[in-house]
Image (cartoon, grey):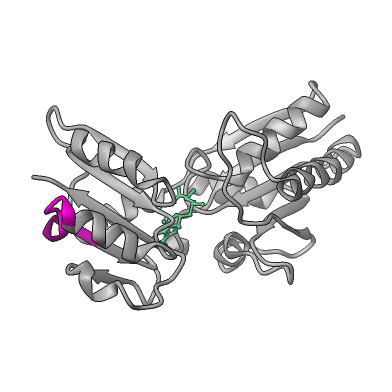
């Protein structure tokens, strides 16, 4: 019988934020296929889960996915599609051999996760693949909790955007929303700080760096972070009220 492909959200870093279901699926799968942003194969998602669930007897694979911008509706960079395609081929091989394969992904799979691109590629190649998505604690909720800030109450509107968006789009979103969560901020801090300053929103912004990890840092004055090398695991919440 063909195996099932599971995409499992593993939370933002603290292994205690791994769900019971995520742990159970990881325990039952023969093959762990973990994404890596590095050619040498380090995987943050794998690090989070392997502290909590035994890797004994598991086939552990890491796969390099280049971190390049993907604009939905446009053709992605060929290096990116090649990585999705290669991943899908390896995964299908294990599924056809009757193995269950789990793809641990940072935070929640629904939010900017490579897991969904791999699912789309799998489904395009082979329509009969069985896929299950297991939600996880997103860095969005975890950062909100760490900062002690709600994301939306009553009739407020919340928008999540990658900070790599063009300035015009970010300006419009900030004008129309009560709360904006910026992800992928680490390389564009000067641009965000400048924009928030222009809109007089700097004092409404909080930066949560390495949320839920031992060295978590909360920047209540994000001007201080503008010339610092902040970690990729950084999220900004701008709450108007
Ligand atoms: C590719 S997205 C993945 C988001 C993930 N699927 C989620 O639900 O949290 C990566 C971005 O998530 C945010 N992020 C992930 N882990 C984080 C953490 N521990 N602390 C703060 N932000 C984090 C950062 O904005 C980072 O640039």
Q: Residue furthest top?
A: 127
Q: Residue at x 40, y 62 (%)?
A: 188
Whether 57 is drawn above or below 144: the answer is: below
Whether 241 is drawn above or below 197: the answer is: above
Quarter-of-image position of residue 48: bottom right
Q: How many marks?
A: 0
Q: Residue at x 57, y 69 (%)?
A: 51
- Residue 205 sits inside the magenta stretch: yes
* x then y, percent, for residue 146: 25, 61
* Left or right of residue 125, residue 199 in this image: left
Asked whether the viewer can see residue 209, the reply is yes
Whether 100 is drawn above or below 52: the answer is: above
Q: Quadrant of the N terminus?
A: top right
* x then y, percent, for residue 84: 74, 44
- Residue 240 sits inside the magenta stretch: no
Say which of 194 and 144 sits in front.
Answer: 194
Asked whether the viewer can see residue 148, the reply is no
Q: Residue at x 63, y 32 (%)?
A: 132
Q: Quadrant of the C terminus?
A: top left
Quadrant position of ligand 1: bottom left
Q: Residue at x 46, y 54 (%)?
A: 11
* x then y, percent, for residue 23: 57, 51
Magenta extent: 198-206
* Left or right of residue 147, residue 51 in this image: right
Say which of 111 and 1 sits in front.
Answer: 111
Say which of 63 and 136 sits in front.
Answer: 63
Q: Residue furthest left?
A: 241
């Amino acid at each position: 019988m063909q195996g099932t492909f599971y995409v499992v959200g593993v939370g933002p870093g603290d292994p205690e934020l791994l769900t019971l279901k995520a742990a159970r699926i990881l325990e039952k799968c023969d093959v762990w296929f973990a994404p890596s942003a590095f050619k040498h194969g380090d995987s943050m998602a794998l690090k989070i889960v392997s502290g909590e669930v035994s890797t004994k007897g598991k086939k552990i694979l890491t796969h390099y996915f280049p971190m390049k911008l993907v604009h939905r509706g446009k053709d992605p960079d060929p290096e990116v599609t090649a990585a999705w395609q290669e991943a899908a081929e390896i995964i299908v091989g294990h599924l056809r051999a009757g193995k269950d394969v789990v793809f641990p992904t940072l935070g929640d799979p629904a939010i900017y996760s490579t897991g969904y691109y791999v699912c789309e590629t799998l489904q395009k190649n082979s329509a009969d693949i069985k896929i299950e998505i297991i939600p996880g604690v997103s860095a969005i909720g975890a950062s909100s909790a760490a900062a002690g800030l709600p994301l939306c109450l009553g009739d407020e509107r919340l928008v999540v955007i990658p900070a790599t968006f063009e300035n015009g789009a970010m300006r419009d979103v900030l004008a129309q929303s009560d709360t904006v969560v910026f992800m992928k901020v680490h390389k564009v801090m000067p641009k965000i700080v400048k924009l928030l300053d222009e809109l007089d929103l700097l004092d409404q912004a909080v930066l949560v760096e390495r949320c839920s990890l031992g060295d978590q840092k909360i920047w209540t004055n994000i001007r201080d972070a503008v010339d610092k090398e902040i970690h990729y695991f950084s999220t900004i919440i701008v709450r108007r009220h």
